[in-house]
C-alpha cells in the first residue's frame, strides 16, 4: 500500500519492449537504497515489482494489462517519474490509501496559475467519474490530491465529459511531475478504493 506522498523524482533509463509486455529500468537513489528483489515501488502511481537492482536503478517487468491501462507505454528514456516506496505498517498515512492499481488515464485540459500555486483541470474517463467527489481524494500520477471541484458534461479535449480540478501547492509543483504536465498530456488516475467497494456492496444488496 502507498500513500500518494511522492518521495523522489526519478528518471526512466531504459525501456525494452516486447510483443505485449515491457521491461523498464528507472533511476531513483532514494527508493533503491533499501529496496530488495520482489519488493514494490510505485512509478507514477503504478505499483511495480523490483526484479533487478543495479546501484541506484531498479528494473521491473510490465504486462499488457498495465500497458493498456496506464501512460507507461508512452514512457521512454529521460522521462521523469514520481517514485514512492510502500508505507511501513508503523508509518504515517500522510495522503490517502493508494493501492498503486491505476484505474485509467486522464487528460490535462488546463492549468490556471495562481500567486504561488496552480489549479489543474483534468478530463477523467466516463467510467471513473462516478467515483470522484468534491473534497474527496484522487491519486494523479501517484500523487495524493484533494478534489477541488467536479464539473459534469463539459466540453474539454475535443469531447464532452467530467472535468476534475485539483490545486497544486508549491511543494507539489516542485517535487513531482505534475509541476510540468502540459495540456494534452496523459496522467494516471486511481480513484478512492473505498468508493468502489461501497458501490460493489450496494450492487450485491440490490440484486
Image (spheres, helix red, strand yellow):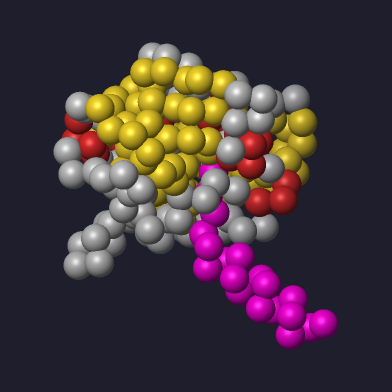
Q: Quadrant of residue 108?
A: top right
Question: Is 30 situated above or below 34?
Answer: above
Q: Is any atom of residue 205 visible in this view?
A: yes
Q: Quadrant of residue 33?
A: top left
Residue at left 20%, top 62%?
Answer: 91
Principal secondary structure, stretch drawn in magenta:
helix
Is 144 in front, or is 22? 22
Instruction: Look at the image and give the residue range highlighted in magenta.
Output: 189-207
Is 43 in front, or is 122? 43
Would residue 102 be found to the left or right of residue 200 on screen?
left
Would residue 24 be found to the left or right of residue 193 on screen?
left
Residue at left 52%, top 50%?
Answer: 101
Residue at left 56%, top 58%?
Answer: 133
The quarter of the rendered structure image containing the N terminus is bottom left
Q: Is any atom of residue 182 visible in this view?
A: no
x then y, percent, for residue 167? 41, 40
x then y, percent, for residue 16? 50, 20
Amino acid at each position: 500500500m502507498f500513500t500518494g506522498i511522492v518521495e523522489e523524482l526519478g528518471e526512466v533509463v531504459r525501456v525494452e519492449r516486447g510483443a505485449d509486455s515491457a521491461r523498464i529500468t528507472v533511476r531513483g537513489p532514494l527508493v533503491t537504497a533499501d529496496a530488495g528483489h520482489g519488493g514494490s515501488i510505485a512509478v507514477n502511481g503504478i505499483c511495480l515489482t523490483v526484479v533487478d537492482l543495479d546501484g541506484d536503478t531498479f528494473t521491473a517487468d510490465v504486462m499488457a494489462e498495465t500497458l493498456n491501462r496506464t501512460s507507461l507505454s508512452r514512457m521512454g528514456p529521460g522521462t521523469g517519474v514520481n517514485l514512492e516506496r510502500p508505507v511501513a505498517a508503523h508509518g504515517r498515512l500522510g495522503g490517502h490509501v493508494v493501492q498503486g492499481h491505476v484505474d485509467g488515464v486522464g487528460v490535462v485540459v488546463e492549468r490556471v496559475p495562481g500567486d504561488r500555486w496552480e489549479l489543474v483541470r483534468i478530463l477523467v474517463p466516463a467510467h471513473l467519474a462516478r467515483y470522484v467527489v468534491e473534497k474527496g481524494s484522487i491519486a494523479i500520477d501517484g500523487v495524493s490530491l484533494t478534489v477541488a471541484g467536479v464539473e459534469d458534461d463539459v466540453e474539454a479535449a475535443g469531447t464532452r465529459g467530467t472535468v476534475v480540478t485539483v490545486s497544486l501547492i508549491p511543494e507539489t509543483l516542485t517535487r513531482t511531475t505534475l509541476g510540468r504536465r502540459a495540456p494534452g498530456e496523459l496522467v494516471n488516475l486511481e480513484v478512492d478504493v473505498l468508493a468502489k467497494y461501497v458501490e460493489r456492496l450496494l450492487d450485491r444488496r440490490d440484486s
